[in-house]
Amino acid sequence: MAITAYSQQQVGNVTIVTVTSGLSGTIYYHWYLYGLWQGVTQAPSKAFVLGVGKQARIEVNDTNDVDYDGPANAPTAYPAVRTLTWIRSLASDVACYRVEQQQDGGDWNTIGTVQRNGAQWEYRFTTPALDDLSTYDWRVYPIDETGNDGTVLNLDGELIVRTPDSPDYTVTFDSGTTKVAFAEAA
């Protein structure tokens, strides 16, 4: 990996990331959003729809290897999104599932709909970007063919902490040597 420069430009809710590689020849750029593989390009830029004012962790691996396995070489995922999992409803008339999210005890908002697949037992849905230091709760409603809500399924909530506490340290200045020393506080 030889990325030498990284820049981004935001236009409305689209963020365009452009990189410069130190590699030569045919270069393959593997793109990741929050540690999740987003695809491969031969162009050194990619557009991401993030939402106005939203920030995201976007990473890219560059390689000359046409057989490079992007998903297998993903960076450590950044915990800014969650993959919600639930087991299908046993009701025979379910058409879809409505996924709702609540932030810090506020209003419930619909964040997506997942269509029913008769052969599928377990469903998964990845949330949009989550704000740091916020508590989230999620619930899923099976919706029948006439649009009526079924019995709600409440999923486990979570406090999102992406920003760790800053280290506690002391700083001393030695006037004789004019050096500053940093030490971890006890």
Image (spheres, rainbow, N blue to C red):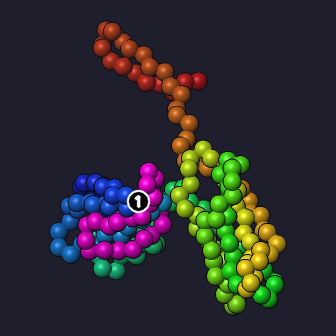
Quadrant location, the C terminus = top right
Q: Is residue 118 visible?
A: yes
Q: Is residue 42 magenta?
A: yes
Q: Amino acid at mark 1?
A: Asn
In the rendered picture of this protein, how many numbered marks are placed on residues? 1
Q: Residue 168 at x, y = what percent?
A: 54, 28
Q: Quick check: 55 above or below 133?
A: below
Which secondary structure, mark 1? loop
Query: What's the residue at 30%, 13% (across, down)?
Result: 177
Q: Residue 47 at x, y = what percent?
A: 34, 66
Quadrant location, the N terminus = bottom left
Q: Residue 165 at x, y = what percent?
A: 56, 36
Q: Is residue 177 magenta?
A: no
Residue farthest bottom in this picture:
119
Q: Is residue 121 visible?
A: no
- In this orientation, which residue lies closer to the viewer: 14 or 55? 14
Residue carrying label 1: 13
Residue 113: which quarter of the image?
bottom right
Query: What's the residue at 65%, 60% (across, down)?
Result: 109
In this rendering, position of residue 62 left or right of residue 138: left
Query: What's the residue at 30%, 14% (across, down)?
Result: 178
Residue farthest top in this picture:
176
- In this orientation, which residue lies closer to the viewer: 23 or 184? 23
Q: Residue 96 at x, y = what percent?
A: 68, 80
Query: What's the residue at 45%, 73% (across, down)?
Result: 71
Q: Quick check: 148 above or below 61?
A: below
In this rendering, position of residue 168 left or right of residue 8: right
Residue 19: which quarter of the image?
bottom left
Q: Which residues are magenta?
A: 35-61
Residue 91: which quarter of the image?
bottom right
